[in-house]
Image (cartoon, grey):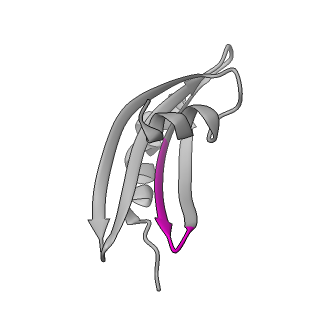
């Protein structure tokens, strides 16, 4: 199981939700590697669409996760993806 899928299923969502990994991306910015991924989490009442980015530096793990319910994703998805793509550590 890819690390992004493990994070989505075991860390970033509530227990019992059905998690589906949609997309993953790796990018390099100023010498640091960032891993971006998109996923949905479903329960009996709603579906949440999320995007996240993770990186590690000097032994510290950093993550930014954001999302919207599926009904709002069409309107908010591009803005939330831009937010995730803009995430970077500063020294």
What residue range appears in magenta? Answer: 51-59
Residue drawn where x is 64% and y is 40% of the image: 11
Residue 10 position by quadrant: top right
| Most foreground residue, 27 or 83 | 27
Residue furthest front as drawn:
59
Q: Where is residue 35 in the image (x, y as percent from the top left)?
A: 38, 53
User: As rendered, which of 6 and 76 lies closer to the eye?
Assistant: 6
In the rendered image, residue 65, in percent from the top left (x then y), is placed at 55, 50
Q: Nearer the viewer, residue 72 or 30?
A: 30
Quadrant where the N terminus is found in the figure: top left
Image coordinates of residue 87 in percent, x first then y, are 44, 66
Image coords of residue 45 (percent x, y): 68, 17
In this view, the residue in front, 61 or 14, is 61
State the residue lying farthest toward the top: 44
Q: Is the magenta stretch mostly helix, strand or loop?
A: strand
The residue depicted at 53 percent of the width and 35 percent of the height is 6
Residue 4 position by quadrant: top left
Image: 67 above or below 10: below
Report if residue 64 lies within the magenta region: no
């Amino acid at each position: 199981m890819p690390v992004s899928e493990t994070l989505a299923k075991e860390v970033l969502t509530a227990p019992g939700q059905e998690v589906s990994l949609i997309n993953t991306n790796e990018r390099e910015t100023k010498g640091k590697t960032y891993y971006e991924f998109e996923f949905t989490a479903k329960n009996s009442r709603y579906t949440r669409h999320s995007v996240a980015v993770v990186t590690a530096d000097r032994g510290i793990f950093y993550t930014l996760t954001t999302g919207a319910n599926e009904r709002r994703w069409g309107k908010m998805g591009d803005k939330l993806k831009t937010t995730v793509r803009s995430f970077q550590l500063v020294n």
